[in-house]
Amino acid sequence: MSLELLEKNAQIENVPDVVALEKDVHISPWSSTNFKDALSAKNIFKVFMIDNKLVGYYIALLAMNECQLLNIAIHKEYQKKGFGLKLIKNLKKICIDADISSIFLEVRVSNKNAIKLYEQSGFNELGIRKNYYKINTGWEDGVLMGAEL
């Protein structure tokens, strides 16, 4: 097994694997329709594979000179191995090439691993969005984070 990470634009045939990964790693996962909508909206939707296995993906929206990271996930088997950093680095390169000056995202306040990843990638906390995420027991705050490019 090689560990070469292959990046490509998501296609409709990737959606079932993306949905399965999403359900495995997120508390309140996006639906298949959400991912199909992201494809039709022409968002940046990248999938990352190793040996034809989905390792991760991200979806981002570019508007004016800003980027909003809408969704990102790494397969549990590949978490804490630097793959999240590679996905963020990939997005940053796309943004720089498109003359984007800032990237913004929200993350659950309890998702300490993701917050650490974003901080390692140059993101800073900008504020708290009260009751932003639906979870099994009600609602959870979101941390708004941003990075200047």
Image (cartoon, grey):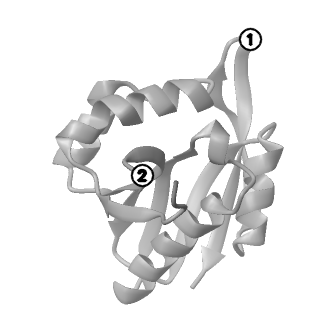
SS class of the residue under badge 2? loop
Q: How many residues crowd mark 2 within 10 Å: few (<14), some (14–19), many (20+)?
A: few
Which one is closest to the eye, mark 1 or mark 2? 2
Q: Residue at 65% x, 40% y: name it.
A: 77
Q: Residue at 68% x, 61% y: name it.
A: 145
Badge 1 amino acid: Thr
Q: Position of residue 143 (x, y in %)?
A: 73, 49
Q: Is residue 103 left or right of residue 51?
A: right
Answer above or below: position of 63 versus 13.
Answer: below
Q: Position of residue 11 (x, y in %)?
A: 21, 47
**Discs 1, 2 touching: Cβ within 8 Å:** no
Q: Is residue 95 left or right of residue 131?
A: left
In this view, the residue in front, 74 or 30, is 74
Determine which of the numbered discs, if any, sits on residue 137 in the image: 1
Q: Which residue is mark 2?
A: 51
Q: Residue at 55% x, 61% y: name it.
A: 3
- Looking at marks 1 and 2 on the same chain, the residue that comes earlier in the sequence is marked by 2
In this view, the residue in front, 107 or 36, is 36
